[in-house]
Amino acid sequence: MSMTFFGQVALVTGGAAGIGRATALAFAAEGLKVVVADLDSAGGEGTVELILASGGEGIFVACNVTREADVQQLLARTVGVYGRLDYAFNNAGIEIEQGRLAEGSEAEFDAIMGVNVKGVWLCMKHQLPLMLAQGGGAIVNTASVAGLGAAPKMSIYSASKHAVIGLTKSAAVEYAKKKIRVNAVCPAVIDTDMFRRAYEADPRKAEFAAAMHPVGRIGKVEEIASAVLYLCSDGAAFTTGQALAVDGGATAI
Protein backbone atom coordinates (compact mmCIF):
# COMPACT_ATOMS: atom_id res chain seq x y z
CA MET A 1 0.00 0.00 0.00
CA SER A 2 2.85 2.39 0.70
CA MET A 3 3.95 2.53 -2.96
CA THR A 4 0.43 3.63 -3.87
CA PHE A 5 0.68 6.79 -1.80
CA PHE A 6 4.28 7.99 -1.93
CA GLY A 7 4.62 11.66 -2.89
CA GLN A 8 0.90 12.36 -3.08
CA VAL A 9 -1.07 14.93 -1.09
CA ALA A 10 -3.69 14.35 1.61
CA LEU A 11 -5.88 16.82 3.49
CA VAL A 12 -7.23 16.04 6.97
CA THR A 13 -9.80 18.26 8.66
CA GLY A 14 -10.20 17.95 12.40
CA GLY A 15 -6.53 17.00 12.45
CA ALA A 16 -5.58 18.50 15.80
CA ALA A 17 -6.29 15.39 17.86
CA GLY A 18 -7.91 11.97 18.01
CA ILE A 19 -8.86 10.23 14.79
CA GLY A 20 -7.76 13.19 12.66
CA ARG A 21 -4.27 13.31 14.17
CA ALA A 22 -3.83 9.54 13.94
CA THR A 23 -4.85 9.57 10.28
CA ALA A 24 -2.61 12.52 9.44
CA LEU A 25 0.33 10.67 11.00
CA ALA A 26 -0.60 7.48 9.14
CA PHE A 27 -0.74 9.32 5.82
CA ALA A 28 2.66 10.89 6.53
CA ALA A 29 4.13 7.51 7.44
CA GLU A 30 3.09 6.26 3.99
CA GLY A 31 5.01 9.07 2.29
CA LEU A 32 2.22 11.55 1.67
CA LYS A 33 2.46 15.31 2.09
CA VAL A 34 -0.23 16.18 4.63
CA VAL A 35 -2.29 19.32 5.09
CA VAL A 36 -3.70 19.43 8.63
CA ALA A 37 -6.74 21.66 9.16
CA ASP A 38 -8.51 22.52 12.41
CA LEU A 39 -9.87 25.37 14.52
CA ASP A 40 -7.45 24.31 17.26
CA SER A 41 -4.22 25.93 16.06
CA ALA A 42 -2.09 24.60 18.92
CA GLY A 43 -3.30 21.04 18.37
CA GLY A 44 -3.00 21.29 14.60
CA GLU A 45 0.53 22.68 14.79
CA GLY A 46 1.31 19.88 17.23
CA THR A 47 0.22 17.29 14.69
CA VAL A 48 2.46 18.86 12.06
CA GLU A 49 5.36 18.87 14.51
CA LEU A 50 4.88 15.13 15.00
CA ILE A 51 4.82 14.62 11.23
CA LEU A 52 8.03 16.60 10.75
CA ALA A 53 9.72 14.87 13.67
CA SER A 54 9.07 11.51 12.01
CA GLY A 55 10.63 12.67 8.76
CA GLY A 56 7.38 13.51 7.00
CA GLU A 57 6.15 16.64 5.29
CA GLY A 58 3.12 18.68 6.28
CA ILE A 59 1.60 22.07 6.96
CA PHE A 60 -1.15 23.38 9.23
CA VAL A 61 -3.98 25.63 8.05
CA ALA A 62 -6.47 27.10 10.51
CA CYS A 63 -9.97 26.50 9.18
CA ASN A 64 -13.58 26.73 10.33
CA VAL A 65 -15.29 24.24 8.04
CA THR A 66 -18.66 25.97 8.48
CA ARG A 67 -17.34 29.06 6.67
CA GLU A 68 -17.04 28.80 2.91
CA ALA A 69 -14.29 31.43 2.75
CA ASP A 70 -12.20 29.39 5.20
CA VAL A 71 -12.66 26.22 3.17
CA GLN A 72 -11.77 28.02 -0.06
CA GLN A 73 -8.65 29.42 1.59
CA LEU A 74 -7.75 25.94 2.88
CA LEU A 75 -7.92 24.42 -0.60
CA ALA A 76 -6.10 27.38 -2.14
CA ARG A 77 -3.28 26.96 0.37
CA THR A 78 -3.13 23.22 -0.30
CA VAL A 79 -2.75 23.74 -4.03
CA GLY A 80 -0.45 26.73 -3.54
CA VAL A 81 2.00 24.72 -1.44
CA TYR A 82 1.72 21.23 -2.93
CA GLY A 83 0.15 21.77 -6.34
CA ARG A 84 -2.66 19.21 -6.05
CA LEU A 85 -4.99 17.26 -3.77
CA ASP A 86 -5.14 13.49 -4.07
CA TYR A 87 -6.99 12.48 -0.89
CA ALA A 88 -9.29 14.26 1.52
CA PHE A 89 -10.39 13.03 4.93
CA ASN A 90 -13.30 15.22 6.02
CA ASN A 91 -13.19 14.42 9.71
CA ALA A 92 -14.05 17.65 11.54
CA GLY A 93 -17.10 17.10 13.73
CA ILE A 94 -18.71 17.81 17.08
CA GLU A 95 -20.84 15.88 19.53
CA ILE A 96 -22.53 17.94 22.25
CA GLU A 97 -25.94 16.43 23.01
CA GLN A 98 -26.89 15.34 26.51
CA GLY A 99 -30.58 14.47 26.40
CA ARG A 100 -33.62 13.20 24.54
CA LEU A 101 -34.84 14.77 21.32
CA ALA A 102 -37.45 17.04 22.91
CA GLU A 103 -34.83 18.38 25.32
CA GLY A 104 -32.51 19.63 22.59
CA SER A 105 -32.04 23.30 21.77
CA GLU A 106 -32.01 25.14 18.48
CA ALA A 107 -28.45 26.23 19.23
CA GLU A 108 -27.36 22.60 19.61
CA PHE A 109 -29.09 21.66 16.36
CA ASP A 110 -27.46 24.48 14.42
CA ALA A 111 -24.00 23.80 15.86
CA ILE A 112 -24.07 20.05 15.19
CA MET A 113 -25.56 20.33 11.73
CA GLY A 114 -23.26 23.23 10.89
CA VAL A 115 -20.02 21.36 11.54
CA ASN A 116 -21.03 17.77 10.82
CA VAL A 117 -23.13 18.33 7.70
CA LYS A 118 -22.48 21.78 6.26
CA GLY A 119 -18.78 21.35 6.95
CA VAL A 120 -18.57 18.09 5.02
CA TRP A 121 -20.69 19.52 2.20
CA LEU A 122 -18.53 22.65 1.89
CA CYS A 123 -15.32 20.64 1.91
CA MET A 124 -16.51 18.27 -0.80
CA LYS A 125 -17.95 21.18 -2.79
CA HIS A 126 -14.47 22.66 -3.12
CA GLN A 127 -12.42 19.45 -3.15
CA LEU A 128 -14.28 17.81 -6.02
CA PRO A 129 -13.46 20.47 -8.67
CA LEU A 130 -9.75 20.12 -7.85
CA MET A 131 -9.91 16.36 -8.23
CA LEU A 132 -11.91 16.67 -11.44
CA ALA A 133 -9.29 19.00 -12.90
CA GLN A 134 -6.44 16.63 -12.13
CA GLY A 135 -8.27 13.50 -13.26
CA GLY A 136 -9.22 11.75 -10.02
CA GLY A 137 -8.89 11.37 -6.28
CA ALA A 138 -10.51 9.86 -3.21
CA ILE A 139 -12.55 11.35 -0.40
CA VAL A 140 -13.42 9.77 2.94
CA ASN A 141 -15.92 11.40 5.27
CA THR A 142 -16.25 10.64 8.97
CA ALA A 143 -19.76 9.42 9.73
CA SER A 144 -20.51 7.13 12.68
CA VAL A 145 -22.36 3.99 13.65
CA ALA A 146 -24.91 6.56 14.85
CA GLY A 147 -25.47 7.24 11.16
CA LEU A 148 -26.35 3.58 10.54
CA GLY A 149 -29.12 3.31 13.11
CA ALA A 150 -30.64 4.89 16.18
CA ALA A 151 -28.62 6.75 18.83
CA PRO A 152 -30.81 7.44 21.89
CA LYS A 153 -30.09 10.81 23.54
CA MET A 154 -28.02 11.76 20.51
CA SER A 155 -30.79 12.28 17.96
CA ILE A 156 -29.38 15.42 16.33
CA TYR A 157 -25.90 13.91 16.14
CA SER A 158 -27.38 10.73 14.66
CA ALA A 159 -29.31 12.75 12.09
CA SER A 160 -26.14 14.63 11.14
CA LYS A 161 -24.24 11.40 10.55
CA HIS A 162 -27.09 9.92 8.51
CA ALA A 163 -26.81 13.10 6.43
CA VAL A 164 -23.05 12.61 5.99
CA ILE A 165 -23.71 9.13 4.63
CA GLY A 166 -26.34 10.58 2.27
CA LEU A 167 -23.88 13.17 0.98
CA THR A 168 -21.25 10.47 0.60
CA LYS A 169 -23.43 8.09 -1.41
CA SER A 170 -24.83 10.83 -3.63
CA ALA A 171 -21.41 12.29 -4.45
CA ALA A 172 -20.03 8.81 -5.07
CA VAL A 173 -22.63 8.14 -7.75
CA GLU A 174 -22.32 11.60 -9.30
CA TYR A 175 -18.55 11.32 -9.73
CA ALA A 176 -18.08 7.56 -10.16
CA LYS A 177 -17.16 7.85 -13.84
CA LYS A 178 -14.73 10.69 -13.14
CA LYS A 179 -12.25 8.50 -11.24
CA ILE A 180 -13.23 10.05 -7.92
CA ARG A 181 -14.24 7.69 -5.14
CA VAL A 182 -16.21 8.89 -2.11
CA ASN A 183 -16.70 6.73 0.98
CA ALA A 184 -17.45 7.16 4.67
CA VAL A 185 -15.95 5.55 7.73
CA CYS A 186 -18.33 4.83 10.61
CA PRO A 187 -16.56 4.44 13.97
CA ALA A 188 -18.22 3.14 17.11
CA VAL A 189 -16.83 4.34 20.48
CA ILE A 190 -13.17 5.23 20.04
CA ASP A 191 -10.56 6.07 22.67
CA THR A 192 -10.14 9.80 22.10
CA ASP A 193 -9.85 12.85 24.36
CA MET A 194 -13.56 13.42 23.75
CA PHE A 195 -14.35 9.92 25.01
CA ARG A 196 -12.15 10.34 28.08
CA ARG A 197 -13.78 13.63 29.01
CA ALA A 198 -17.23 12.08 28.70
CA TYR A 199 -16.52 9.01 30.79
CA GLU A 200 -13.74 9.85 33.24
CA ALA A 201 -16.22 11.04 35.86
CA ASP A 202 -18.16 7.76 35.81
CA PRO A 203 -16.18 4.53 35.22
CA ARG A 204 -19.46 2.63 34.86
CA LYS A 205 -20.09 4.45 31.60
CA ALA A 206 -16.71 3.35 30.30
CA GLU A 207 -17.55 -0.25 31.21
CA PHE A 208 -20.86 0.06 29.38
CA ALA A 209 -19.10 1.48 26.32
CA ALA A 210 -16.71 -1.47 26.23
CA ALA A 211 -19.54 -3.96 26.67
CA MET A 212 -21.55 -2.57 23.73
CA HIS A 213 -18.86 -3.89 21.37
CA PRO A 214 -18.80 -7.69 20.93
CA VAL A 215 -14.99 -7.61 20.89
CA GLY A 216 -15.15 -6.40 24.50
CA ARG A 217 -13.35 -3.07 24.19
CA ILE A 218 -13.58 0.35 22.58
CA GLY A 219 -11.66 1.14 19.43
CA LYS A 220 -8.30 2.80 18.89
CA VAL A 221 -7.73 5.87 16.74
CA GLU A 222 -5.12 3.97 14.74
CA GLU A 223 -7.76 1.41 13.75
CA ILE A 224 -9.88 4.14 12.18
CA ALA A 225 -6.82 5.60 10.47
CA SER A 226 -6.08 2.19 8.93
CA ALA A 227 -9.61 2.04 7.53
CA VAL A 228 -9.29 5.51 6.03
CA LEU A 229 -6.00 4.66 4.35
CA TYR A 230 -7.52 1.49 2.93
CA LEU A 231 -10.46 3.42 1.47
CA CYS A 232 -8.02 5.84 -0.15
CA SER A 233 -5.70 3.13 -1.48
CA ASP A 234 -5.70 1.39 -4.84
CA GLY A 235 -6.78 -1.70 -2.92
CA ALA A 236 -10.20 -0.06 -2.67
CA ALA A 237 -10.31 0.97 -6.33
CA PHE A 238 -13.68 -0.78 -6.80
CA THR A 239 -15.14 0.63 -3.57
CA THR A 240 -17.21 3.81 -3.63
CA GLY A 241 -20.39 5.03 -1.98
CA GLN A 242 -19.86 2.82 1.05
CA ALA A 243 -20.28 3.51 4.77
CA LEU A 244 -17.69 1.26 6.38
CA ALA A 245 -18.48 0.38 10.00
CA VAL A 246 -15.34 0.05 12.14
CA ASP A 247 -17.12 -0.87 15.30
CA GLY A 248 -15.91 -4.04 16.99
CA GLY A 249 -19.05 -5.83 15.81
CA ALA A 250 -21.51 -3.37 17.39
CA THR A 251 -23.75 -3.08 14.32
CA ALA A 252 -23.75 -6.86 13.81
CA ILE A 253 -25.91 -7.43 16.89
Image (spheres, helix red, strand yellow):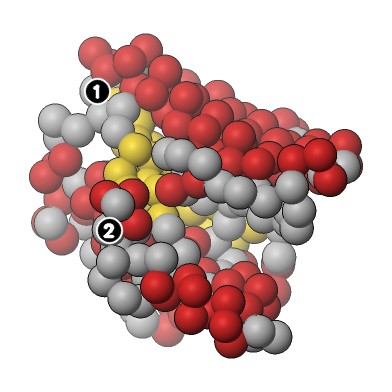
- Point out residue 36 in the picture as x, y percentages from the top left corner: 53, 59
Nearest the eye: 205 or 239: 205
Q: Nearer the viewer, mark 2 or mark 1?
A: 2
User: Which residue lies at the image location 37% right of the left edge and 47% below the top edge?
Assistant: 185
The 10 Å Cα crowd at callout 2, few under 14, some 14 to 19, many 20 or more, is: some
Nearest the eye: 164 or 91: 164
* Of pointers 2 and 1, the one earlier in the residue sequence: 1
Residue 130 seen in the figure: no
Q: Which residue is mark 1?
A: 179
- Check disc 1 and report its element: helix, strand or loop: loop
User: Which residue lies at the image location 30% right of the left edge and 33% below the top edge?
Assistant: 242
Nearest the eye: 92 or 165: 165
Q: Which picture quadrant has residue 194?
A: bottom right
Q: How many marks?
A: 2
User: Which residue lies at the image location 11% right of the left edge and 45% below the top edge?
Assistant: 235
Query: Is residue 192 rendered to the left or right of residue 174?
Result: right
Q: Which residue is mark 2?
A: 249
Residue 38 seen in the figure: yes
